[in-house]
Amino acid sequence: MTGCEIGTQSEDGKYQLEYCECLGRCDTAPNIIVNGKLYTSVTKESLETIVKEALS
């Protein structure tokens, strides 16, 4: 979706994908942070929606 591998930035410099060891929310894993917002209980389907919204 973004063209990024973990630890890299997209060619246009707009997107970056980072790995984080722990967000301290094991009870709601898997979790991600996008643009400073925490998303919990992420599924493949919800991830696609989250990323599409962030890219728009």
Image (cartoon, rainbow, N blue to C red):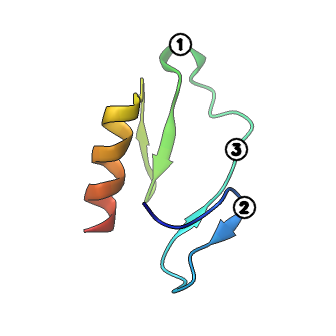
Location of the N terminus (image quadrant): bottom left
Q: Residues within 10 Å of mark 3 (few under 14, many from 20)?
A: few
Q: Amino acid at mark 2?
A: Gly
Q: Is residue 36 left or right of residue 51?
A: right
Task: Determine the secondary structure under disc 2.
Answer: loop
Say which residue label 1 marks.
Answer: 27
User: Which residue corresponds to the image point at 56% horizontal and 76% vertical from the top-left?
Assistant: 10
Task: Determine the secondary structure under disc 1.
Answer: helix
Disc 2 + disc 3, Cβ < 8 Å: no
Q: Which mark is residue 36?
A: none
Upstream in the sequence, badge 3 or badge 1? Answer: 3
Q: Position of residue 44 (x, y in %)?
A: 40, 33
In-front residue for pair 39/4: 4
Q: Which mark is residue 20?
A: 3
Say which residue label 2 marks.
Answer: 7
Q: Amino acid at mark 3?
A: Cys
Q: Nearer the viewer, mark 2 or mark 3?
A: 2
